[in-house]
Image: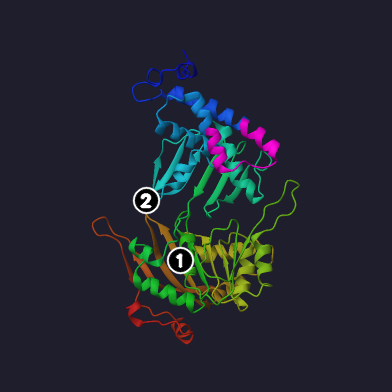
Amino acid sequence: MGLLERLDKKNPAANAGPAGAVEPDEMSVLRDRVHLEVVETLNKREEKQGGNTGEPETRAIIENALEAHAGGMARPERMRIAGEIYDSIRGLGPLERLLMDETVTEIMVNGAKQVFVERKGKLVLTDVTFFDDEQLLNVIDRIVSPLGRHIDEANPMVDARLADGSRVNAVIPPLSLKGPLLTIRKFSKSPLTVENLISYGSLTFKMAAFLEACVKGRLNIVISGGTGSGKTTLLNVLSAYIPHDERIVTIEDAAEIQLQQKHVLTLEARPANLEGSGQITIRDLVRNALRMRPDRIVVGEVRGGEALDMLQAMNTGHDGSMTTGHANSTRDMLARLETMVLMAGMNLPIPAIRQQVASAIDIIVQQSRMRDGSRKIISISEVLGMEGDVIVTQEIFTYDYGDGRTPGRFRPTGIKPHCCDKLSASGAGVKDEWFS
């Protein structure tokens, strides 16, 4: 006798076992049956009403359907299944539980049956699965559609964000051979502060005080590092030091920067539509931002020709601007900036490009993800200018890696930055003891 026939009997105890429990495979049959029935009910109701059914009414429909099919099931179990069905229909399905988990910093879906998460910098395989690839595709579509973006075989990759700013990337077949792939970089519900980073061991108080002075003193800052090294997090933390009486324009592929100031204008790039037109790039937005009378421009990440426009903005009165970029070291970041300027299609000589870089950038902060999963600022360097055809930098703070017997440690190099005079003149206090 099948599950539904047994549950329809009048004796609940005989139907559901001693604790109202149901076998796992039978639970799946019940969930699928109720899910299908609820979707059909909602479709008919919304077609008749001409709008989406609200959350309370949707939950009531689910609970009524479960009551009809599994009235003898224990209430906690029935409520759990009701929650799963609601998340599948209105939310992000099995991912809702992971999104609510504060210990999870990243979610990596490798097809319908394999979901990894990052906890404390380590990757962990979870027991979360989707019914099938179709359910996963529906979840991806539910994320990207409200943003005016689309994903299909003709456009099988997309960048998006959740309502809280969490970064989303999705890749589907035919590019992915393992089914739909979804990566979510979660944002903390409460933005991190510099005190949090100090307590996590990402930097020291002296480093934080110097970076605070650099932001308040309107130095141009580039944060570099590898993927997942915490560049955007650090950018968010440093941006908190920007005075509230300044007009700030932020520019990103998908809006992630969470500024707390009142006068913030957020610009977001737009991909091409189905006809292949209407694309607005980061470079377009940087050029447009110059006409918006910004005090500072904050670019989430430079990865192409927009680097040239960003450097020109830094060189033409928009002091205190900030951005991030992918690089493994300070010197690599300078080399990458040269390459990105060339990607703008301008046939500029290398010495001219280096002169632009040297005059635009004041501070480069190098971020790294360590083997134990922690994130640390391993270098803070000052750009001094040109010496011949070479950009000259000097390291202000560095991180000495341990040798296995002794732990790593932060330390100042003992060099007092040349920018101290500029910082003092701007009113940003600088203490010699930070660098000794």
The foreground one among 314 and 399 is 314
Q: Quadrant of residue 295?
A: bottom right
- Residue drawn at (59%, 37%), measured in percent from left and top? 137
Left or right, residue 50 beside residue 418: right
Tell me which segment is drawn in magenta. Answer: 41-62
Q: Position of residue 87 (x, y in %)?
A: 52, 39
Q: Is residue 74 above or below residue 205?
A: above
Q: Residues within 10 Å of mark 1 (few under 14, many from 20)?
A: many
Q: Residue furthest left?
A: 405
Kindly identify the residue that appears in the image at 34 percent across and 60 percent down.
200
Q: Is residue 51 magenta?
A: yes
Mark 2, Cα crowd under 10 Å, few <14 / some 14-19 / many 20+, is few
> Looking at the image, which residue sits at the far front?
10
Residue bearing the label numbered 1: 237
Residue 403 belongs to the span the image colors magenta:
no
Judged from the image, the secondary structure of the residue bearing numbered disc 1 is: helix
- Outermost residue, top side: 1
Q: Nearer the viewer, residue 161 or 346?
A: 161
Q: Which amino acid does label 2 sit on?
A: Lys
Position above or below: 229 against 2:
below
Three-letter amino acid code of the residue under disc 1: Val
Badge number at residue 120? 2
Q: Which label's residue is closer to the chain start, 2 or 1?
A: 2
| Residue at mark 2 to residue at mark 1: CA–CA distance | 19 Å
